[in-house]
Image: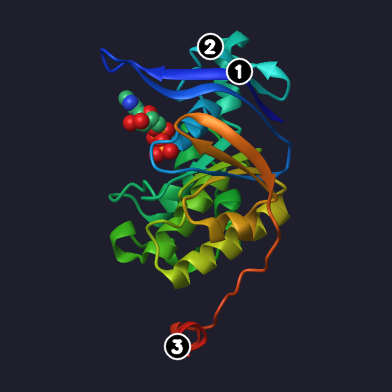
Amino acid sequence: MIQFEQVTKTYDLGNPQKKALSAISLEITAKECFGIVGPSGSGKSTLLRLINQLETPDTGHLMLDDEDVSRLSAKEQRLKRQSIGMIFQQFNLLNNKTVYDNVALPLKLQGKIKQKRVMEIMDFVNIDNLANQYPQQLSGGQKQRVAIARALSFDPRILLCDEPTSALDEQHTEEIIKLLKEVHQHFHTTMVIVSHEFSVIRHLCTRAAILEEGQLLDVIPVSPTEPTVFDSYYHRALESLN
Ligand code: ADP
C-alpha cells in the first residue's frame, strides 16, 4: 500500500517559494491501478517522485507497506526503491546500448543479471525480435515497450507511469494501453499512472485523484471501458472518420 499522510512539498526557488503539493492525504491500495490527473503544474510528477524517493516530503509522511520511508535506513530505502519501476513520456533509453542491454541494465546495476529473466520479459512485451537493435532504429511504441520491459525486469511491486503515451500516436497509444493492462493482469503490480489523456486513465484505472495547484480536489471511481484496439491505421481512420 502507498499512503500519503498530510504530505507537503515546496521547491525552493528563492522568494517566493513554490508549493508543489499542499497537505496531501491519499491511499493507493496494493495491486490497484490508480490514476492521477490534473493540469500542467498541478503536482502530478512531484507525487510520483515522492513515491520513488527522488524527492522527500517537507512535512507529513509517505508510507510504503505501512513503513514510514523517512524512518528507514539508507539500505532499507534502497531496497524499497528497487521494488519500484518507472516509465516516462520520453522513454529514457540509453541510445548507445542495444535493446537487450537497456532491458538488462537495472538487473546489472543490482548485481542480479539473469539472462533468462531478460528474455522472458522481452518475450512478454513482444520485443524479443529487437534484442540487437538500438533505440534510434525503433518506433515510439517499440521504445516504450523496451522501457516497460526494463521497468519490469526486476519484478517491481509498484510501477509508476509518467505520461506513458503522451509522445505516441493513436495507434501506439492503444497498443501501450493494452500492454499496460496485460502487465497489470499478469504481474498484479500496483500501478500509478499520471496522464493528461483521460482516455488512458479510463481504460486502465479503477480510481483517480484529481489535483489542481498542488491540492487534492477529489479521489473518484473510474468507469471501466474496454479500449478499442484497431488492427490497422486504416481501420482506425475508417472508424473515427467515417
Ligand atoms: P505536473 O506534473 O502536474 O506538471 P509538477 O509536479 O512537475 O507538476 O510541478 C508542480 C509545481 O512544482 C510546478 O509549479 C513546477 O513548476 C514546480 N516544480 C516541479 N519541479 C520543480 C523543481 N525541480 N524545481 C522547482 N520547481 C519545480
Q: Which of marks 1 and 3 is nearer the N terminus?
A: 1
Compared across the picture, whether 182 is left or right of 151 comes to right
Within 10 angstroms of label 2, few (less than 14), some, or many (20 or more) residues? some
Question: Measured from the top left, where is residue 103 in percent x and y?
Answer: 47, 49
Question: At 61% from the left edge and 18% from the top edge, which residue is drawn?
Answer: 6
The amino acid type, in three-letter code, at marker 1 is Gln
Q: Which mark is residue 131?
A: none
Label 2 belongs to which residue? 59
Label 1 belongs to which residue? 6
Q: Which mark is residue 234?
A: 3
Q: In which quarter of the image is residue 180?
A: bottom right
Closer to the eye: label 1 or 3: 1
Question: At 51% from the left edge and 22% from the top edge, which residue is drawn?
Answer: 22
Cα–Cα span, label 1 and label 3: 49 Å
Cα–Cα span, label 1 and label 2: 7 Å
Q: Earlier in the sequence, mark 1 or mark 2?
A: 1
Question: At 52% from the left edge and 52% from the top edge, which residue is drawn?
Answer: 149
The amino acid type, in three-letter code, at marker 2 is Thr
Q: From where the camera sits, is residue 110 visible?
A: no
Question: Measured from the top left, where is residue 17 in percent x and y?
Answer: 33, 16
The amino acid type, in three-letter code, at marker 3 is Tyr
Q: Earlier in the sequence, mark 3 or mark 2?
A: 2
